[in-house]
Image (cartoon, grey):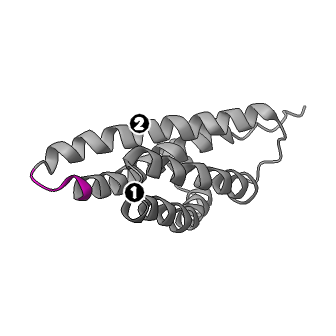
Amino acid sequence: MRNRLKALFDIKLWKFLLVGVINTLIGAGIMFTLYNFAGFGYWPSSAANYLVGGIISFLLNKYFTFQNKERSFSQIIKFAGTVAISYGIGYGIARPLTSWLLSSYTAALRDNIAMLAGMCLYTGINYIGQRFFAFKEKPAPKTL
């Protein structure tokens, strides 16, 4: 158990979070601008965030965070699947939970808080998926 926790909390986590800060600045800017100023709804605004952020995230996490050298289409599919599942779970939990907890507030305030909460849930779920699925380290070949 201790080794598994060590595997989660190493330099890769800090690099992942740094990439996340970059993605957040760009993606959240897009998401909140689309929602609050361009009239887009909750789902299109948050989806635009993760479409743009997903491209940036793939490149930075593959080469900077996880230093993954694999070149395969299946890795792109794994990454996209991880992002999609993380997005669906994170935002799918955040919106109804926030709506329930903040039912007396305006829909716009609830949606903005739900998008913020969804970002946090997404980040945790996505880190685990990218680390141990999309960019999983291949074990070193055994030598005799």
Q: Amino acid at mark 1?
A: Gly
At a point 41% along the width and 36% down the height, the residue shown is 89
Tag 1: Cα neighbours inside 10 Å, few (<14), some, or many (≥20)?
A: few
Work out which residue is located at the far right of the displayed protein and give it.
Answer: 144
From the viewer's perspective, is the residue at label 2 or at label 1 nearer?
1
- The residue lying toward the viewer, choosing from 64 and 3, is 64
Residue under pointer 1: 39
Residue 88, image x and y in percent? 44, 36
Q: Based on the displayed image, in which of its 4 quarters is residue 99 positioned?
A: top left
| Res. 89 mark | 2
**Main SS, magenta residues:** loop
Residue 3 in sight in this render = no
Q: Amino acid at mark 2?
A: Ile
Q: Is residue 61 above or below residue 77?
A: below
- The residue lying toward the viewer, choosing from 144 and 93, is 93
| Res. 88 mark | none
The residue range painted magenta reads 104-108
- Mark 2–mark 1 CB contact (< 8 Å): no
**Total tally of numbered discs in the picture:** 2
Residue 126, image x and y in percent? 52, 45
